[in-house]
Amino acid sequence: MHVPIPIVYPHRVSFFSNEGCDVCDSSDSNFIGVHKYIGFRCCGSNNCNNKMQEWIDLTTKSKYELENKYGTNIKVQRSDESIEDNWFIISNAYQEHENGPFWVEVSDENNNSKFVTLSELDELNK
């Protein structure tokens, strides 16, 4: 009987220790980045590559896809509750756990950056 492998969500990956392939636990693995230090570890076998691509498709949204949906001039809500224009998407969006929100990093022209959820972008950028 084949037991399906549960989805692994993008997670913080240490570069100081080899944590092993997220699919098969092989100690010989490489970092597959989603955002800075967030991503997956994969050994590179065909089986693991295919499974990894399936997980990436389910748990991430590309910057290109997001820019097509929201444009390149978006509104965000700041910590002080004010709404500002002229922010832009600087990363892929990723989901950290099952049924969790998708997070994306955005920045303004002064290099201020913050993480927001896609539901926040949906609300402010209708």
Image: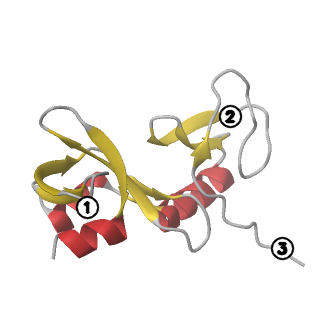
At x 68%, y 34%, the residue is 29
Kind of residue indicated by mark 1 = Leu
Q: In the image, is 78 to the left or to the right of 26?
A: left
At x 33%, y 45%, the residue is 114
Q: Where residue 67 sits: x, y (%)?
A: 19, 58
Q: Secondary structure at mark 3?
A: loop
**First in residue order: circle 3 vs circle 2:** 3
Q: In the image, is 8 to the left or to the right of 110?
A: right
The residue nearer to you, when weighing 57 against 99, is 99
Residue 119 in which image quadrant: bottom left
Q: Is residue 32 above or below residue 62?
A: above
Kind of residue indicated by mark 3 = Val
User: Spatial distance from mark 3 to mark 1, Cα to Cα?
Assistant: 34 Å
The C terminus lies in which quarter of the figure?
Answer: bottom left
Q: Which label number is shown at residue 66?
A: 1
Kind of residue indicated by mark 2 = Ser
Q: Where residue 97 sits: x, y (%)?
A: 61, 63
Please tell me how many numbered marks the rendered image carries: 3
**Where does label 3 land, which residue?**
3
**Where does label 2 land, which residue?**
29
